[in-house]
Amino acid sequence: TDELMLEKKIHIYPNPADENLVVKGLPDLGEAIIQMINISGNVLLDMKCYSKEAVIDLNKFANGIYFLQIKSRAIKTPVQPASQSDNS
């Protein structure tokens, strides 16, 4: 379906990430909402994006495993794991 084709074009990198996480390939069909969710299910970031690329600043988050959910009128992705590396 068209929905599956759009999902395959979204790239999230680097993983694990140190400072920034890039979400590339968002649909150019208006607003997309990117949510970062912790392992307990709490939404830590609820970001609106109006372009095909978003950069998430990870400096305000503790090291750990997070999940991304991306929603727009065109797509709704399942929750994707993303981890922040430990530079200690």
Image: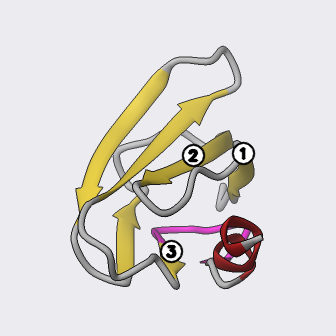
* Cα separation between marks 2 and 1: 6 Å
Above or below, 20 against 58 in this view is below
Between discs 3 and 1, the one toward the N terminus: 3
* Cα separation between marks 3 and 1: 15 Å
Q: Residue at x 70, y 54 (%)?
A: 82
Between discs 2 and 1, the one toward the N terminus: 2
Magenta residues, as a range?
12-21
Residue 19 within the magenta-colored segment of the rendering: yes
Q: Which residue is mark 1?
A: 78
Q: Residue at x 22, y 71 (%)?
A: 50
Above or below, 67 against 58 in this view is above
- Rendering quarter of residue 4: bottom right
Q: Which mark is residue 23?
A: 3
Q: Position of residue 71 (x, y in %)?
A: 47, 50
Which type of secondary structure does the marked residue at label 1 adopt? loop
Q: Could you tell me if the residues under marks 2 and 1 are in contact, i.e. CB atoms within 8 Å? A: yes
Q: Is residue 33 visible?
A: yes
Which type of secondary structure does the marked residue at label 3 adopt? strand
Q: Quadrant of the N terminus?
A: bottom right
* Cα separation between marks 2 and 3: 11 Å
Of 68 and 75, the residue lying toward us: 75
Q: Which mark is residue 69?
A: 2
Tell me: 67 left or right of 56.
right
Q: Position of residue 77 (x, y in %)?
A: 65, 52
